[in-house]
């Protein structure tokens, strides 16, 4: 009679690094994109890109890692046969973008970041 035995595999092969875990966690929080701005009506592409750049600048000035709140992605429209660039954002990143700030400095950036967390 043949006995069955379990194969043992090295645990190292299946371990995730803390960096991979962090990346997965923050990627899961990126629930918004530029298409969510449609509720605002006709927003020009220039206004959208300016607001995005300002939100990124706020994060950098406040010492926030932008990679945790903004991620550039490429989207292929199969129907039109075109590709365009979109940006996935966390709730905080999206809120910062919506604020469309006129003047940015370090203290204002930190205040706006705290406001977006509420």
Image (spheres, rainbow, N blue to C red):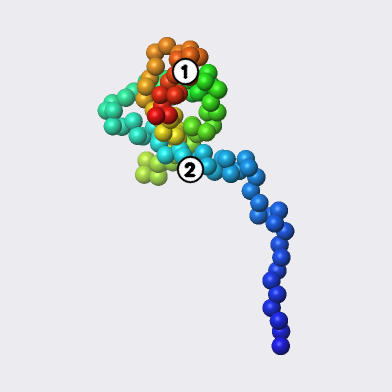
Q: Residue under circle 1?
A: 109
* Residue 97 picture location, percent across and down: 40, 25
Q: Is residue 63 above or below residue 37?
A: above
Tell me the crowding category of disc 2: few under 14, some 14 to 19, or many 20 or more residues within 10 angstroms, Cα based: few
Number of numbered markers: 2
Label 1 vs 2, first from the N-terminus: 2
Snapshot quadrant of residue 65:
top right
Q: Residue furthest left?
A: 41
The 10 Å Cα crowd at callout 1, few under 14, some 14 to 19, many 20 or more, is many
Position of the C terminus, as image quadrant, is top left
Disc 1 to disc 2, how far (Cα)? 25 Å
Position of 71 relative to 56 (above/below): below
What residue is pinned by disc 2? 28
Considering depth in this image, is 102 or 6 the residue closer to the camera?
Answer: 6
Residue 68: x and y, percent? Answer: 52, 33
Residue 47 placement: quadrant: top left
Res. 61 in view: yes
Q: Secondary structure at mark 2?
A: helix
Residue found at x 34% / y 30%: 37
**Residue 66 x %, y %:** 52, 28
Position above or below: 17 against 53: below
* Rendered-image quadrant of the N terminus: bottom right
Numbered disc 1: secondary structure: helix
Nearer-the-camera pick, 81 or 77 = 77
């Amino acid at each position: 009679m043949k006995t069955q035995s379990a194969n043992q595999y090295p645990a190292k092969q299946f371990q995730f690094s803390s960096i991979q875990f962090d990346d997965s966690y923050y990627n899961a929080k990126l629930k918004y994109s530029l298409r969510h701005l449609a509720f605002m009506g006709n927003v020009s592409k220039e206004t959208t890109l300016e607001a995005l750049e300002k939100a990124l600048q706020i994060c950098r000035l406040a010492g926030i890692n932008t990679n945790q709140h903004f991620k550039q992605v490429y989207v292929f429209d199969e129907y039109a046969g075109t590709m365009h660039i979109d940006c996935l954002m966390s709730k905080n990143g999206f809120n910062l973008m919506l604020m469309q700030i006129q003047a940015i400095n370090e203290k204002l950036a930190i205040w706006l970041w705290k406001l977006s967390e509420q």
